[in-house]
Image (spheres, rainbow, N blue to C red):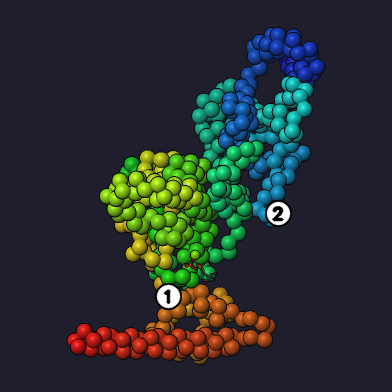
Amino acid sequence: MWTELSATISSLAVAFFMFEKYLNYFPYTIRGYVERNFRKVVNFVNPYVEISFPEFTSERLKRSDAFFAIQNYLSTSSTENARRLKADVVKDSQSVVLSMEDYEEVTDVFNGVKVWWASGKIPPQSQSISWFPGSEEKRYYKLTFHKRYREIITKSYVEHVLKKGKEIEVKNRQRMLYTNNPSKDWHGWKATKWGNIVFEHPSTFDTLALDTAKKEEIKKDLIKFSKGKDYYTKIGKAWKRGYLLYGPPGTGKSSMIAAMANLLDYDVYDLELTTIKDNSELRKLLIETKGKSIIVIEDIDCSLDLTGQRKKRKEKDDDEADKEKDPISKKKKEAEEESGSKVTLSGLLNVIDGIWSACGGERIIIFTTNYVDKLDPALIRRGRMDKHIVMSYCCFEAFKVLARNYLDIESHELFGKIEELFVETKMSPADVADNLMPKSDEQDEETCLKRLVEALEASKEEARKKSEEEAVLKTKDGVVTEG
Ligand SMILES: Nc1ncnc2c1ncn2[C@@H]1O[C@H](COP(=O)(O)OP(=O)(O)OP(=O)(O)O)[C@@H](O)[C@H]1O
Ligand SMILES: [Mg+2]
């Protein structure tokens, strides 16, 4: 009896295999009918359940996130099992990610339950000629398991696969630096609002010359934020954080942004406000940004006249009536409006923490400026710009980081003199770095350090002269007023 039963099962398996394989050769009109009835018979004896995950969801153009998560998940297990693999080169040709070829099958075990994954594709139904090769093919993954484990597989296993797949995607993804395209280029074939290139800035917190305690504080703040999804939900706040970086030129504001992106593995969106026409365009741009990203507006004080906008508007209202009457000033006003950006302070505030800002989550917004006093207080209040970081002139501790990075030295006899000079002189880390950098093979550390000492002394002398001149001017002023 057993022999007979096993023979029946194997013939059924063979029949099923043949059926699946040759189904496509049936005439299209009767294919559905044959398949339906055959499946009825098979389902009666087949104890296995199948779930398929198609590449495209119902909206034809949107690729399914689940499909990619599964692809990534299977890339780890399939490399050991599958015989035919596909290779994808990621991270600037540095590593290869392998995934299953079409019609391959691999097994996986979850909590002692065995499942089968197979990949396949449905060939195009129509014989149309397409500009995009392969665009009509519909690929899918098929998960097969015993119906006894339906509960555990549909509830826990699928969730586990999607989660792990997303984690792998984050690890493998190439980070991007985006910048907004002018809105006149937003239309047409394949037009996108953001242009992108691979983000490869080498700056890290280790190479950043900054007070150690401050560096650690910023790092902790960033890591706490990146892990804070549940916390932000609990307190009812959008998962985003604003940083304001301010300080004189060359003090490392841009380098700090790159270091932050490298620490958290985030993409960077460099937002150029001057090319955005109005508030609604600004909002559209923001909606198109992805999570795990840093949105940067550099030199916010120069980007737009956001500083005095509120005040100006008030003044404007007063003499609006007079100007409207004058045709020349009306024309001028129109021309100004056409050429310039109409992004307003309130538009920007809305984007940072209005109702729209919550779309997506896990975003850091950074403003940089050289003149913090010029900014409207509303723009930088806590809650909008949660953390204000001042980047100041180089101190001795910051110098030691630069000396280690640029010259590979921890100490030198000139360090004592340099420490003294730093107390009295203001020099940006960019200038210090420039002096420390050997300009030819002949220049050793001694030469570079001496050059720095000379530069510091020159700067000290200059500062002394300047303060003397100011003192003279002040006394003169005093004499004049008294006189
Ligand atoms: N704190 C720093 N640590 C390490 N390198 C620095 C630091 N500050 C400046 N540099 C060096 O100086 C160069 C200029 O720095 P960066 O562009 O970050 O300055 P910035 O503050 O953004 O200046 P700006 O206000 O003009 O935009 C960088 O290439 C970097 O090598
Ligand atoms: Mg900069």
Q: Name the residue rendered at 53%, 40% in the picture.
A: 163
For mark 1, give the secondary structure.
loop
| Mark 2: amino acid | Ser
The answer to which of 341 and 435 lies nearer the viewer is 341
Considering the image in quadrants, where does the N terminus appear? top right
* Rendered view: 141 above or below 267: above
Is the residue marked 1 within 8 Å of ligand 1, measured from its CB?
Answer: no
Q: Residues within 10 Å of mark 2 (few under 14, many from 20)?
A: few
Q: Find residue 202 and report its horizontal and vertical position in percent.
A: 58, 64
Q: Find residue 25 and report its horizontal and vertical position in percent.
A: 80, 17
| Mark 1: amino acid | Tyr
- The residue that disc 1 covers is 393
Q: Earlier in the sequence, mark 2 or mark 1?
A: 2
Using the rendered view, name the quadrant where residue 450 is placed: bottom right
Mark 2 or 1, which is nearer the eye? Answer: 1
Q: From this viewpoint, is residue 367 visible? A: no
Q: Name the residue rendered at 31%, 57% in the picture.
A: 377
**326 horizontally vs 182: left or right:** left
The answer to which of 40 and 64 lies nearer the viewer is 64
**249 horizontally vs 109: left or right:** left
- The residue that disc 2 covers is 93
Q: Are marks 2 and 1 in contact (CB under 8 Å)?
A: no
**296 horizontally vs 375: left or right:** right
Q: Name the residue rendered at 68%, 11% in the picture.
A: 36
